[in-house]
Amino acid sequence: MLLSIAAALAIASLEVRSGIGDDRRIVVDEVLGVLVLVALIATWRRIAITAVAALFLFVDRWKPWPLNVIETIPSPFGVLADDMAAGAIVGSAALLIWLAWPKATLAYRGATCGRTMKNGSALMADTSRSTKNGPKP
């Protein structure tokens, strides 16, 4: 939140000096958009984050509705809001896909929380045959 306020103030200052609204040299809005995105998918592997960040950049350049409407807000917050909304939209969509894809979720959980079997279920120690002094013969 503080970063977005500081970015808006910096963008307002640059807009006044240069006279250009959403100057392509301003990248803090994209940085904030990616931060929103990463906050939603923070536990993913690097390759997934990279792929979703690339999707964010594509959506940010394409500006589908409602991003094209948000971008027209006449203030530095309009410059920031469209990228933060793009991050939220792409991150939410990726999160929904992640949650709807149980095999990927199981495989990821198994890869990060311990060993897994081929079907994705976690390997557990067989404690049904053990005793206080060790396993039964």
Image (cartoon, rainbow, N blue to C red):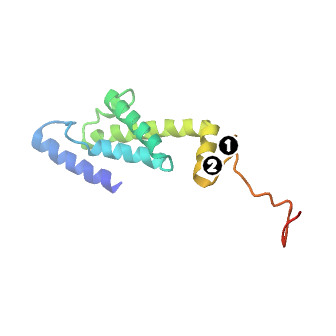
Amino acid type shown at disc 1: Gly
Q: Residue at x 84, y 73 (%)?
A: 133
Between 118 and 8, the one nearer to me in the picture: 118
Ranked by sequence position, the earlier of labels 2 and 1 is 2
Name the element at disc 1. Answer: loop
Residue 63 horizontal/vertical position (percent): 34, 28
**Residue 109, horizontal then vertical, whole percent:** 61, 48
Q: Which residue is under mark 2?
A: 110
Left or right: where 4 falls relative to 132: left
- Locate residue 49 relative to residue 119 in the image: left or right: left
Q: Position of residue 36 (x, y in %)?
A: 41, 46
Q: Residue 120's mark?
A: 1
Foreground residue among 124 and 18: 124
Q: Is residue 2 above or below residue 87?
A: below
Q: Is residue 73 above or below residue 106?
A: above
Circles 2 and 1, Cβ within 8 Å, touching? The answer is yes
Image height of 42 relative to 74, above or below:
below
**Is 42 or 81 nearer to us in this picture?**
42
